[in-house]
Image: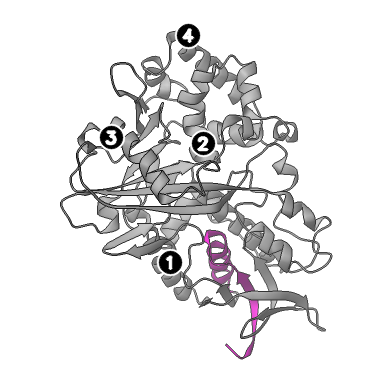
Amino acid sequence: MNDTRSQRAVVIGGGLAGITAALELADAGLGVTLVEGRPRLGGLAFSFRRGDLTVDNGQHVYLRCCTAYRWFLDRVDGAELAPVQARLDVPVLDVAHPGGPRLGRLRRDPLPVPLHLGRSLATYPHLSLAERASVGRAALALKKLDPADPALDDVDFATWLGRHGQSDRTIEALWDLVGVATLNATAPHASLGLAAMVFKTGLLSEAGAADIGWARVPLGELHDTLARKALESAGVRVDTRTKAESISRTENGSWRVELAGGTLEAEVVVLAVPQKETHDLLPEGALDEPDKLLGIGTAPILNVHVVYDRKVLKQPFFAALGSPVQWVFDRTDSSGFTGQGQYLAVSQSDAGDEIELPVAELRARYLPELEKLLPAARGAEILDFFVTRERTATFAPTPGVGRLRPSARTRADGLYLAGAWTATGWPATMEGAVRSGFSAAGAALSTLGRPHVHPLQEAA
């Protein structure tokens, strides 16, 4: 690219936040260019080829309550490719049980909140009767919290759980089972505000809110192939392998975006890149305290991928207790695997202690654990074993992070921020990313004097 082009809007970053902002701006009639440094769209929710497999860099799921991400799937014509469970059902295997792996289930009944989880909790075998009763009392107390209360952001979730009678076992077998997967942090390292938001929205808002959805195709088909098609159909120019190097004002007051091979000028710029990259690109004065962005930490996620020569798991997924293993998913069909075996992905959130371990050490650690959990894996031949690492997978949801997350608007007219790390009220999820794109586009359109109806408001 060696030309200078003028567009009403430029979106920098082709993850879910940037894609959403670009679609919203284009749907409102603006000429939009989206630039992305990678050769693909999708940010950190992407796929790649490994031999005959199409591999997701990590297992991503969403819940029925994730209305923004569900809008995204509808908008790119991908909803049928990532369906939601008819009813929440999570198998939970406790490998430490004296009689061998013990199966419990977290599932809901077709009853109103909070009765929808009553039977499941009453029969959950991984907690004692007293512990189950304590969970009900804590849930009622949690329901009274306002996740938007800034005071909650200063308290860690474990402290609150302890004050409400939750034992270490209860935290491990229930609260962290859900919390680590959604927050990417254990209870001692998670903001009470974010934890309250997750549990109130997912488990205590509507009966079906926590039903789980996941892609039955590679993520790249949704977040790159279909997203690119939707963008181009909306009139968005998509320039991948194009990195923004600086942003500055022109003499006429518009924005100049310097790229490696050219320049873009626009009335509106949406920065939809990670917090450190945003900090480096922000013009002087755009935020009162730009260094706050550098205080937003990151948390890693590790995925261990195993291809067996036979079927070893009958369920589409399960969660584990008493083991380093957290969640295991069957990725056989979605990866395009056509052999006689089975491809499993082990998803390990909050993986700071393991993210740099050599593959050989991870293999020695996880294969025996999978054999404990899945007796059918004992004696099976390993056709492939590999690891994917996202060292900065999410922002760290630590107490106090809420004060650091900026809103979509900056002090510079026409410049807006998007990304799951911005002030969405959600943890770092695909839902949060899409919501941030809505916020940035909505703020931009409001400034331009264009009427804008949020797509979720339309749906309501």
Left or right: 275 as drawn, with respect to 123: right
- Neighbor class of circle 3 (other Cα within 10 Å; few <14, some 14-19, many 20+) is some
Measured as percent of width and height from the top left, residue 336 is found at 25, 59
Inspect the image, locate mark 2, and give the three-letter code of the amino acid beneath it: Val
| Residue 163 position in % (x across, y down) | 65, 17
**Please, is residue 171 above or below residue 5 in the view?**
above
Q: Amino acid at mark 4?
A: Ala
Q: Counting residues from the N terminus, which is met first, the one under dot 3 or under dot 4?
A: 4
- The circle on residue 239 is none
Residue placed under numbered mark 3 in the picture = 371
Report the amino acid beneath label 3. Answer: Glu
- C-alpha span from label 2 to label 4: 24 Å
Label 1 vs label 2: CA separation? 27 Å
For the residues carrying marks 2 and 3, which lies nearer the camera in this image? 3
Residue in view at x 73 percent, y 33 percent: 154
Q: Which residue lies most toward the top here?
A: 130
* Dot label at residue 130: 4
Q: Of 256 and 69, which appears nearest the observer?
A: 256
